[in-house]
Amino acid sequence: MINNVRGSQDRISMDQKPDERTQSQSHRCQLLDLPWEDVLVTHVFCYLPLRHLVSLQCVSKSFLSLVQVYLANCRKFDPAQTGPHIPKEAFCSMLRHNQVLHHLCVTNCSDWITDKELLPVVGQNQHLLRVDMRGCVHLSRHALVAVSLSCPRLQHLSLAHCEWVDSLALRSLADHCSDLRSLDVTACRQLKDEAVCYLAGKCPALRSLSVAVNANITDTAVEEVAKKCRELERLDLTGCLRVRNEAIRTLAEYCPKLQSLKVNHCHNVTESSLGVLRRRNVEIDVEPPLQRALVLLQDVVGFAPFINLQI
């Protein structure tokens, strides 16, 4: 039956005059004929890497306009998708008209991005839920204050290795973003116990926190986080040299949902406090003393697997 249908269609096509066939071909639907915002932007372009969309702008003026419509309506922007580096002018152009971003990552712009480029984007996107500014050393505390004031629904923020983050800026974040779920302030060495304690009191929904590589952090901050953030699941204390066993015991007591704890290079934290968490199957980045000794012995001597552990 299918062959009969195809045959009838072929006969109809042959019966058509040349002008009619040309006219029917001209009415065939092309990509740009589809509804831009309802179809192409929503159901097609969202699956294309950003670097492909950037290249697509060069095809024609129509495609340039279409890509601009997409960029004005996209919810997630990560310049890493365009390649190792994105020029400053391209970044500003691509986000000039966007007011609906939910996720903004600028780590790939860390070499050049300053408050001048970032603040306009943050100011016009008040629905941001996730912001990643890791390693953006040319920003200032004004960037964090702007995020705090403009994005009250913020849930995830990464500021790792942003040494410009200070206590006043973090307090502003705590005052305006109480729904914060995860915060990474690794190597933000201006922060001290007082700022972390204030954050814990204002953001009890925190589930993930990193205050790694900061010798200013002591038991005071860790215990306050444990008592105020009962939903805590992940805590990174790597290199917090002044944290001791007392803080880890408090963490074990007040945070029943803890899943991961990093205490590498915390020389005052020992197995006497970590053992409680191990028995709860909490993932800890420091091996038990016996296992560490066996690994070392195997590396040095080469016969650790044959040691009788019952001796």
Image (cartoon, helix red, strand yellow):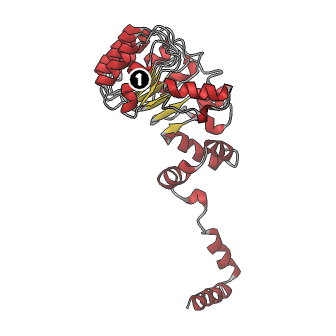
SS class, disc 1: helix
Q: Residue furthest front?
A: 311
Res. 79 visible in picture: no
Residue at (29% x, 20% y) in the render: 228
- Is 37 above or below relative to 284? below
Q: Position of residue 3 (x, y in %)?
A: 61, 89
Residue at (61% x, 45% y) in the render: 49
Q: Position of residue 31 (x, y in %)?
A: 60, 59
Q: Residues within 10 Å of mark 1 (few under 14, many from 20)?
A: many
Q: Position of residue 178 (x, y in %)?
A: 32, 24
Res. 159 visible in picture: yes
Q: Position of residue 268 (x, y in %)?
A: 46, 12
- Is 175 above or below relative to 231? above
Q: Nearer the viewer, residue 261 or 210?
A: 261
Q: Nearer the viewer, residue 16 or 134?
A: 134
Instruction: Name the residue carrying label 1.
Output: 274
Q: Nearer the viewer, residue 54 or 263?
A: 263
